Image (tube, rainbow, N blue to C red):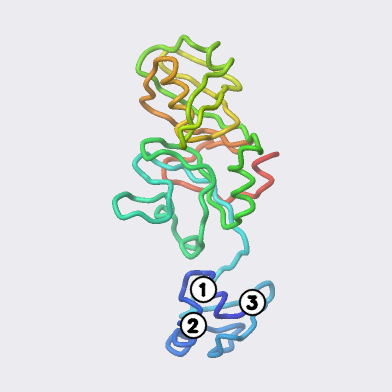
């Protein structure tokens, strides 16, 4: 990979400004100072240091993160804190895509990935990837049969569709629900349709990935296979 492309990929500087950056900032490839932005570096075999700090490069990185309440499922926003702002080195330099968004007032498992194909694989409706949610309601739940059978609600474009629960387990005000879609406010709208207000919503699983012992704001690196194994 060309050094200017590498610097851009790592969000260190733009390709346009790479020449100026290399002139002012010591970048070493296996101990050799690089000034030419077109220099080709072998990322599998050569080590890159910038200001005496090693730059770790991976082509694709996937993270499982526990999104806290009041964090936006976005990369940038002027009004709210965003989930990617929770990341620390060495992940802050990567351009993460969000797979499986959650509302601002919701919490739980999200996947961040640099791989657009993997993001599409997770979010596309045809994947039918099961997602599990813990829901707290405003009064005790008694409409299990209705949600298993399915209810007609509207998506984000006001188009009606049949939304079904794959499984439900309730204990008074608390319900565990599994769905294999993830349309606009789907879980909240399903409960609202049968007369309940969702007071808290937490996603605990996507596929075979589970929050486990993660606390709000924490994250771990995962492999694609972890989603399905």
Looking at the picture, how far across and down is residue 97, in whole percent? 52, 54
On residue 1, the disc is: 3
Q: CA distance from mark 3 to mark 2?
A: 14 Å
Q: Quadrant of the C terminus?
A: top right
The mark nearer the N terminus, 1 or 3, is 3
Residue depicted at x 43% and y 46%: 73
The mark nearer the N terminus, 3 or 2, is 3
Residue that label 2 marks = 18
Looking at the picture, how far across and down is residue 134, in whole percent? 47, 26
Residue depicted at x 47% and y 76%: 14
In this picture, residue 109 sits left or right of residue 130: left
On residue 8, the disc is: 1
Q: CA distance from mark 1 to mark 3?
A: 11 Å
CB of mark 1 within 8 Å of CB of mark 2? Answer: yes
Residue depicted at x 66% and y 38%: 127
Marks counted in the figure total: 3
CB of mark 3 within 8 Å of CB of mark 2? Answer: no
Q: Quadrant of the N terminus?
A: bottom right
């Amino acid at each position: 990979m060309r050094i200017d492309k590498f610097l851009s990929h790592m969000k260190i500087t733009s390709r346009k400004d790479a020449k100026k950056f290399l002139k002012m900032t010591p970048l070493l490839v296996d101990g050799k100072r690089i000034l030419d932005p077109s220099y080709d570096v072998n990322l599998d075999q050569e080590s890159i240091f910038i200001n005496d700090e090693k730059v770790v490069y991976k082509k694709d990185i996937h993270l499982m993160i526990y999104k806290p309440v009041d964090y936006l499922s976005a990369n940038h926003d002027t009004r709210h804190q965003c989930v990617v702002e929770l990341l620390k080195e060495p992940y802050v330099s990567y351009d993460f895509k969000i797979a499986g968004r959650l509302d601002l007032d919701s919490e739980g498992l999200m996947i961040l990935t640099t791989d657009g194909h993997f993001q599409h694989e997770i979010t596309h409706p045809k994947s039918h990837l099961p997602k599990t949610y813990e829901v707290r309601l405003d009064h005790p739940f008694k409409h299990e049969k209705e949600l298993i059978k399915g209810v007609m609600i509207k998506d984000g474009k006001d188009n009606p569709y049949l939304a079904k629960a794959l499984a439900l387990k309730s204990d008074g005000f608390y319900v565990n629900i599994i769905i294999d879609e993830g349309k606009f406010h789907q879980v909240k709208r399903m409960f609202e349709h049968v007369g309940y207000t969702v007071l808290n919503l937490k996603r605990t699983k996507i596929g075979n990935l589970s929050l486990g012992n993660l606390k709000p704001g924490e994250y771990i690196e995962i492999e694609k296979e972890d989603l399905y194994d």
